[in-house]
Amino acid sequence: MLVVAQHVTPQCGGSGSSSGSGMPQNMVVISLNAGPTNDAFNVPFISVTVCLPGQTSGCQTIDGVEVDTGSSGLRLLSSALTVALPRQKTTSGSPVVECFPFQDGYTWGPVATADIRVGSEQAGSVPIQIIGSSDTPAAPDSCTSSGGAAENTLDTLGANGILGVGIFRQDCGPACAFVGSSNPGLYYACGSSGCQVTTESLTQQLQNPVWMFPQDNNGVLIQLPNVTPPGQVQASGLLFFGIGTQSNNALGNATVFTLDDSGNMTTTFGSSRSPGFIDSGSNGYYFLDSATTQIPTCADIKDFYCPPGTLSLSAGNIGANGRSNTVSFSIANADNYLNLPDSLLPQIGGPFAGYFDWGLPFFYGRSVFTAIEGQSSSGGVGPYFAY
Amino acid sequence: MRVARITFGLAIIGACLAVSPDVQASLGGSPSSVQDDRVRMQGALRQVVRSGPFTVHEMQSATGVVVREYVSDAGSVFAITWQGATFPDMRQLLGPYFDRYHAEAERLARSRRGHGPLTVDLGDVVVQSAGHNRSFTGRAYLPGNLPQGVGIESIR
């Protein structure tokens, strides 16, 4: 089921200095519901408007876009997009197509350019990915060799798009700008002889739109309501742009956890010590494995833990800066809850061998900050997480 | 704790050992397939470490992904781990298991109702893939080929 709100917005591309709705300029509402597939849980959705670059018309607002602090860049399903955005081409005129890896699959589709508006914040001429475009060649073997699922349709992506507001300015970074075998091969030039890996400069790559906003551009704050177990059918939360740039996005007494080069802090659980990160794009607490946690996975779906009874657990986060604190959380038997009509399930978790992924349940009842690399804020220069 | 042991016990009992010994791809392959993987990844061997009843061959691909291959004294690769800013060539590393893994990942993508780490358990092979932008990790192992006394917590 595809639910896409579409309307032409004449003022798109304007100054954006006020929303006219009484909402603070740097704030948008997050919908926590079943989303466009009507079965999502622990997935935060917002609406995003894209316009033809530099135009005051030709805009489209797409809802059901997942907010992902674990990636950078805007990706929209071709099937949800009605605006014909200009495509990026190489100097020799070949379309640029991206193969972007997520932990459970990949998206494949052309790079296009759009003006992006989220709430009243705007970024001009931003490279984005159009996922699953029918006029693009099939993904080459070097793309599908990551092994995960093709997530190029609504039922596999689970959203009309993904807005990556993570710690990186670009989705790939310097590695994709290098020539030769060290290039990880996210960007392809798809000419008459097929799709070949191409170098992509930092400015050509997909950009985290937040750092391209003229203001409130050093990160995001996500505030979600507390959720009483076992769950809640739906709720709404808030996404703020900027950290310490307005009265509504101050760090306050949040602890800042700086990160290593891979974007991880350190998380301790019992005697184990592993890389850890906070990710609104993961729909549970994903950590370690059954051999380490002594929590069995479910018999049917190995992606989730199924303890006989609800477990009260705690883990410690330690930043590269040495700041630390302890987080209490609970893991319930997923089999008992996944049949509920609830889109908010605060006690769902699963294995992630050797790592600790604080997914969306971690955000419930918290203010969580994600600071972008190289951007200054009241908490220092990003990247960091803070809560 | 008890339930966890039962789960893994069943996985081992139900394991399938039908892997041809001359398959030139890593998982389930001979020690020489480790070298084939390194060449295919344009990688460099970083170290070979003896650890109890197995040997870990650690290499780094041209794209910077660190791959560890676990070779048993019986002479087969029973596990592989990877860690890096992108994925290694999983088609090469999983060899005969790749297509089934990919098919199951596709099936799970339609049923998981959100995103998160991927655990594919096909009985004879388990593949776990996880991470975030520019930081991916995972492991694949053959439960039925683990050397006696070696638990999956050793594969990391």
Image: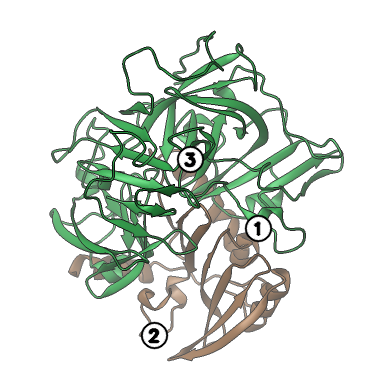
Chain colours: A green, B brown
Indicate left or right for A321 with A109 as reference. left
Is label 2 in contact with label 1 (beta carbons under 8 Å)? no
Looking at the rendered structure, the secondary structure element under dot 3 is strand
Which residue is labeled 3 in the image?
A164
Q: Residue at x 62, y 26 (%)?
A: A114
Q: Separation of disc 1 and disc 3 at Cα? A: 19 Å
State which quarter of the image contains the N terminus of chain A: top left
Indicate left or right for B61 with A297 as reference. right
Q: Separation of disc 3 and disc 2 at Cα? A: 44 Å
Looking at the rendered structure, the secondary structure element under dot 2 is loop
Indicate left or right for B153 with A305 as reference. right
Indicate left or right for A235 with B17 as reference. left
Q: Residue at x 43, y 68 (%)?
A: B15
Q: In this view, does A298 lie above or below A208?
A: below
Give the residue type that dot 2 points to. Gln
Give the residue type that dot 3 points to. Gly
Q: Residues within 10 Å of mark 3 (few under 14, many from 20)?
A: many
Which residue is labeled 2 in the image?
B148
Q: Find residue A308 and report its horizontal and vertical position in percent.
A: 15, 56
Q: Find residue A143 and report its horizontal and vertical position in percent.
A: 66, 50
Give the residue type that dot 1 points to. Ala
The circle drawn on residue A175 is 1
Q: Separation of disc 2 and disc 1 at Cα? A: 41 Å
Out of A106 and A258, give the one closest to the viewer.
Answer: A258
Q: Mark 3 lies on which chain?
A: A
Q: Mark 1 lies on which chain?
A: A
Q: Residues within 10 Å of mark 2 (few under 14, many from 20)?
A: few
